[in-house]
Image (cartoon, rainbow, N blue to C red):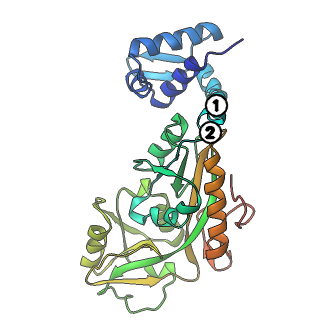
Amino acid sequence: MDLDMAQVRAFVRTAEELHFGRAAGTLALSQQALSKRIARLESLLGTALFQRGGNGVRLTDAGRLFLPPARQAMAAADAAVAAVAGTDRPLRVDVWGHLYAPMRTLAQVAGRAGELVLGHGRDLPSVTAALLRGDIDAAFGRAHPPLPAGLSHRLIRLEPVDAVLSADHPLAAETGLRPDQLRDSVLWAPGALDRLDFLHRFADRFGIRQTATSVNLGLAHFLAEVAQEPRRFSLLPADVPRPEVPGLRSVPLVDPTPLYAWSLLRRTGNGHPGLNGLAAACAEEAGRSRWLEYDPAHDWLPEPPASGPGPGPGPE
């Protein structure tokens, strides 16, 4: 059985969007043309891949089984094309977690990684979708399970986290704080906590009972909100450049020190040669700047590395 990759790509995009109109738009097709491609694929396979009804579009059992290998086939086809035709184009990289300034880490390696073009991601789901579609080659930010099938990640940096709090907070004069000392304070989050995995896990692990959410209007605005209320605190990776905010204190967290894990994501099978250069530049800087130091006796990670981080590949 010979698969038509245009039909496979139409299926994968529709499975990701679960909406024929949106999927057609990402492929620059009419909805009618997209439907024809999927109908031909279903005819070839002898089974329906989607259920279409008043409640929208859903994958059938056969569709769910077909999706992972279809993604792999699409990635292999893209890699084959890139091997002969795409080696001279820039590496397309995106970031997420913008409040924590991911670009400051990439900026330290960009000059050693070849030509980079930056995307416009908003959050982890939008970036992973762009990776799976082939719109970008790599992405950088905090990755946490579950990741979609067809993606792998490489640990790049473990960054200590500080508490930021009002200068009027009862603990503001401390030179270091244990995370559990913040148990009676209010964790101020720049969005719904169930969408902010690191803050959510921190609150669960250290018994932070009181949380409140804001709207992410940038770091300066967010920190000004923290400074306005004596019982509020939030978390910030230690090396994030802080805007000048009156009435704000930053205090290191100790015993344990929370670490924010930055990872490089890629789609399995992407053969762009710039990916190896970027990964090598990150590994070189990690060794020079001691980015991957981790001591489970003194540090806390929501997902400890399975085999311990180091200058090598890290979790994949």
Q: Residue at horizontal 55%, vertical 24%? A: 9
Q: Amino acid at mark 2?
A: Ala
Rendered view: 201 above or below 81: below
Rendered view: 131 above or below 292: above
Please provide percent x and percent y for residue 276: 66, 52
Please provide percent x and percent y for residue 112: 59, 61
Confirm or deny contact between disc 1 and disc 2 (CB under 8 A). Answer: yes
Which label sits on residue 149? 2
211 to the left or right of 14: left
Label 2: few (<14), some or many (≥20) within 10 Å? Answer: some
Rendered view: 251 above or below 242: below
100 or 207: nearer the viewer: 100
Please provide percent x and percent y for residue 24: 42, 22
Label 1: few (<14), some or many (≥20) within 10 Å? Answer: some
Comes first in the chain, label 1 or label 2: 1
Residue that carries the numbered disc 1 in the rendered image: 68
Q: Where does the N terminus fall, quadrant-wise?
A: top right
**Distance between the alpha carbons at the discs numbered 1 and 2:** 6 Å
272 to the left or right of 168: right
Name the quadrant containing residue 286. bottom right
